[in-house]
Image (tube, rainbow, N blue to C red):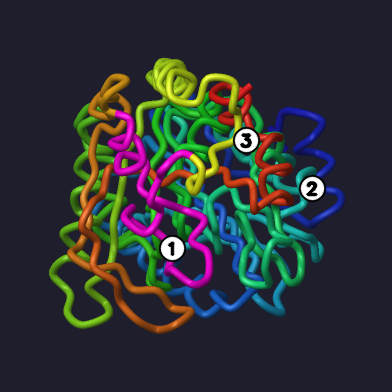
Amino acid sequence: MNWKGVALLLILVLTGCMKDDKPDDIAMRTILVYMVGDNSLSSFTYKNLQSIVEGAEHSSIETCNLLVYIDALDAAPKLYKIEKNSKGKADSVLVVTYKEQNSVDEEVMRSVIETVYSAYPAEEKGLFLWSHGTAWLPSDITNYLKSFGQDGAADMEMTDLKDALPGRYDYIVFDACYMASVEVVYELKDKADYIIGSSTEIIGDGFPYSDIIPILLSGQSLEERLISASTFFYNHYDHLVGYNRTGNISLVRTAYLNDLATTCRQILYGTYEEERMIDPSKFGLDLQALEYLTYPYTDSYLYDFGDFLSQFEENGKISLDETVLYKATTPTAYFDGPKTAMEIQTYSGLSVYIPQKRHAAMNEWYRCLAWYKAVYE
């Protein structure tokens, strides 16, 4: 076989046989969709795989690599490569069947992703991360919070996800709820040039891959393709009806996040002087007046970032236009927990956690994040 790299050879030995189809030349693009579906989303994994295949059939994939890793419920994880046959018909070709493994384990994720991009090198690398998600929130706050990913009872914290991603990507797309938060994109700013995600929930159908894959494999510039894909996501959900008409999307340029953190730090320090943890009751922040981006139970941990910053205009106004390249939301957001929809009046493209002294345990975990260290320390 013509495989290169010890890591790839090790995976072949441990997990089964890979087809010897590695291209000799570097491709234009490699896209990997990493699906962690060993959970309540399992039924959507193969539906999305079929949607990806449909999208590939209407794309020029001959010079590109399109791969899908699926870990579904009660099934061994598998890696597929989407290819066209001599008649131009696209199909998913099984590349590897792995032994049962925890797909949100840091070492497992790193090994799979690193091996794929080593075996299928390209000038441009795109990565989809598909699963449950709850922004940066630690997985042990309540039973329904999973941070990113869920494989059985195992979850992945945001700091672990950062460490699990080898190298840097041209873009990362989160097909998972709540991942367009300022804390998430700042944590991953050195992992990708662009990050796409939603600040609220994404219904189980997820991204409309049959239409988005052709966009991502088109001849437009990278930025044009990402804007077009984000726009299509929004239009797709905005044209649905009832509870299905729910969805917001954001495209973030990570190059501007350091400047955003610096400006935010200056504004908060100007307001709170030596106070490093914001207590809304002490400093006059009315949380009830802010835009919720989680359903408001006793506490809503995620608020609209732009709405939060608007409280400090006397100290200077932050523009998110350079950071958030594209954003759009349907008029309402559907929340599966209470199975109800809530009107979205303000959408800046990012959510934010507001530290409060009554949330001591949450605040302590928040100190681990790069955003906290850049803004509050």
Residue under circle 1? 294
Amino acid, disc 3: Ala
Q: Residue at (32%, 20%) from the top-left corner?
A: 315
Residue at the left extreme of this rendering? 239
Q: Residue at (54%, 58%) from the top-left corner?
A: 134
> Nearer the viewer's eye, disc 1 or disc 3?
1
Could you say which is closer to the camera, residue 34 or residue 308?
A: 308
Residue 296 part of the magenta-drawn span: yes
Q: Residue at (58%, 38%) from the top-left corner?
A: 22
Above or below for 21 versus 151:
above
Residue under circle 3? 119
Residue under circle 2? 12
Q: Is residue 189 left or right of residue 320?
A: right
Q: Which residues are magenta?
A: 283-312
Residue 371 figure quarter: top right
Amino acid, disc 1: Thr
For the N terminus, give its image quadrant: top right
Sequence-wise, the earlier of marks 1 and 2 is 2
Could you say which is closer to the camera, residue 230 or residue 50?
A: 230
Residue 220 figure quarter: top left
* Count of all numbered marks drawn on residues in the image: 3
Amino acid, disc 2: Leu
In the rendering, at what x and y percent does residue 169 appear?
A: 50, 29
Q: Residue at (59%, 27%) from the top-left corner?
A: 275
